[in-house]
Amino acid sequence: MNRHLISAADLSLADAISILDTAEELARLAERPIPKLPTLRGRTVVNLFYEDSTRTRISFEAAAKRLSADVINFSAKGSSVAKGESLKDTALTLQAMGADAVVIRHNASGAPHRLAEWVRGSVVNAGDGTHEHPTQALLDAFTMRRRLGRLSGLRVTIVGDILHSRVARSNVWLLHTLGAQVTLVAPPTLLPVAIGTWPCAVSYDFSSVLPASDVVMMLRVQHERMAQAYFPSVREYSRRYGLDGDRMALLPPHAIVMHPGPMNRGVEITADVADSARSTIVEQVANGVAVRMAVLYLLLGGGPGGPGMAGGPAGQAAMPEPAGVAL
Amino acid sequence: MNAWLIRGARVLGADPTDITIEDGLITELAPAGRATKVAGQVIDADGLIALPGLVDLHTHLREPGREDAETVASGTAAAALGGYTVVHAMANTDPVADTAGVVEQVWRLGREAGYADVQPVGAVTAGLKGTQLAELGAMAESAAQVRMFSDDGQCVSDATLMRRALEYVKAFDGVIAQHAQEPRLTQGAQLNEGEMSARLGLTGWPAVAEEAIVARDCLLADHVGAALHICHVSTAGSVEIIRWAKSKGWRVTAEVTPHHLLLTDQLAAGYDPVYKVNPPLRTAADVAALREGLADGTIDCVATDHAPHPAESKETEWSIAAFGMTGLETALRAVHEAMVTTGLIDWAELADRMSRRPAAIGRLARTHGRPLAAGEPASLVLYDQAPVTAVDPAAHASRSRNTPFAGIKLPGQVIATFLRGTPTVLQGRLCR
Ligand SMILES: [Zn+2]
């Protein structure tokens, strides 16, 4: 595994499985009475958030704290970022503070790549523009594996604004690596023109793919896309690409419904679907912490085999290896 | 008397020749060792290629307004080091070169700098705002004698305004140089729309946004019988349209940049904004079509689109970084690599595409882009095609370092540049 987690495309199959297995173990440990591990004691994790995303920030913060890392939240609001300090200068400041990992959320695609050139610690992409959100894809895969028992051969349908979705990009690369079959469903306007180069199928007919889907992942659609003429109206979008009870009935009995949140109830998903037994939406949030713990653990020097082995994290603190070693 | 004897230079790559220069003119060309006039200073040019001084139709000198990025002095020094003897200074300065006063200021600064002639380009519309014609006639009649007009950086997207501009400058043999970019199709655009933009999540810049304007303006140029020049052609489709327009006999010319002849959008993979440029880097298929178009003459010439930017404009996230690359000091080497090394053109054709034709398009054919012959102005370059070295931006005379070729090995080295008999570069170094 690389020193950074910037793109899901950078993960090998072994990397991805290692993260999911480690997350599984950490999730089990979290069920103990005292769910805190000493693994990253003395290490500093900075949450550098240029976009408001309380849920993702809290998820990373909880993950780092459960591994006993020191957490610094550096948000665009109330910091020098708002006064226009450049990303480079901020990076140099974080470097001087001795950040071992920087978790960055940014509205510009590629900001984590730039940051990685300016800091020595590990960079974790917590969502960059319309590029990627790899920990979301990892927690989605984790959730699918927990619910359905496997990933290889799984038929996953992702529906919505693919063009602008960092969740879709990360899921396409990761699920492809993990051996799942991905089908993207969207109006043609919300698919990249070069979609034919991605390792997935494409359909404009949502209902027709549902009977052959093990997983349906609904993406948030922003109202402003209507003003930009990507589709005529929210109503028409919902009718053609939304998931309601009637459409959900087309799914095989075992199939699950996912959504990375935050949802637009009544737009891409109806309330009865979101709250149904098929829905994994609440689980996804809980699984997010375990997956992010696994990512921080592995990037900051935990070894494969996991924190539960070799004496166990509840016992001695594993000596953190230097960042940069291959997993 | 200011006299030079250049011994044994291969004129346009042909047999070794002695070139005698006296008082700004070439006074004799003779087979090597047969020069009849024994002039003042002697340059041993054994093995070097002699080319006419290069002519750039598209340079951003940034002065007035952004002297932190470049000045007329530093930009023309860069030009001389790249083998150029005249550059066309684009109008998107601050203030905009949309009046006789500003174009004369730039023209005068060029005369004072002395490293290369500076031919100002006038804005088409007042303030580059695309709503009202600038005083084109006043700029034409000024000391700068502007003949080329461009809103470069902005497209003259209003079809009626473009038609009027094309028509209006016919009165003084002017030419409108269009930056072909349909604005609605490129809102927020960052990178060529294709596989890379899709993967990187960068807003796509479709080829059609360029081609639609190229096609429209070719039709307009025909309709009003005017001269149109297309700046920095970047797509295979544009080459096709221009080839078609030329086959009709329409007065359309075009340029391509060295970077579009050599680089593709694959370089954006790491989000380094040094590769962010307008128009964007395209695909390998586009590069192949541009090379073919330049070789067969569909694209008339190479123009650098030298666009210097201070470091802080590039050391940022991709989406907020400035568009543009420097080019003057690497253009000849890049074209050598893309076109000559590949066997697509020879040195005589390179001289045609980098000197004679751009001079004609810029309406400077009486003074620049002249043949290397007795009686002609002694504006020429001596070029060593042998060395292959990595480009070192720190060694550049430009005030800016945003070259996409940093660390890349390119062939060739400019050894000397003469402007009307006076060396501006000798032994690869700036004179004075
Ligand atoms: Zn331009």
Image: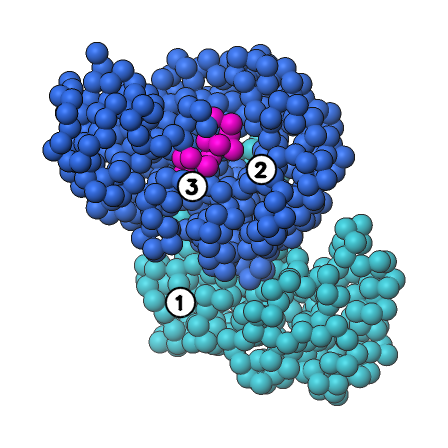
Disc 3 on helix, strand or loop?
Answer: helix
- Residue bearing the label numbered 3: B353
Ligand 1 lies in quarter: top right
Subunit that carries the residue with mark 1: A
- Based on the picture, tell me whether residue A273 belongs to the magenta stretch: no
Disc 2 on helix, strand or loop?
Answer: strand
Q: Give the extent of the magenta segment.
A: B353-364
Q: Nearer the viewer, residue B135 or B390?
A: B135
- Residue bearing the label numbered 1: A1
Q: What colouring does the structure picture have? A: by chain
Chain represented in blue: B
Subunit that carries the residue with mark 2: B
Q: Determine whether the beta carbon of the residue marked 3 sits less than 8 angstroms from the nearest atom of ligand 1.
A: no
Residue at point 66% right, 57% down? Answer: A164
**Labels 1 and 3 in the same subunit:** no
Kind of residue sitting beneath label 1? Met
Disc 1 on helix, strand or loop?
Answer: loop
Would you place residue A54 above or below residue B20 in this image?
Answer: below
In front: label 1 or label 3: 3
Subunit that carries the residue with mark 3: B
- Residue bearing the label numbered 2: B229
Q: Are marks 2 and 3 in contact (CB under 8 Å)?
A: no
Quarter of the view holding residue A182: bottom right
Kind of residue sitting beneath label 2? His
Residue at point 46% right, 37% down? Answer: B357
Q: Is residue B54 left or right of residue A151?
A: left
Would you place residue B331 above or below residue A309 in this image?
Answer: above
- In the rendered image of the structure, the colour used to display chain A is cyan
Q: CA distance from mark 2 to mark 3?
A: 14 Å
What x and y, as percent, mark residue A265?
81, 63
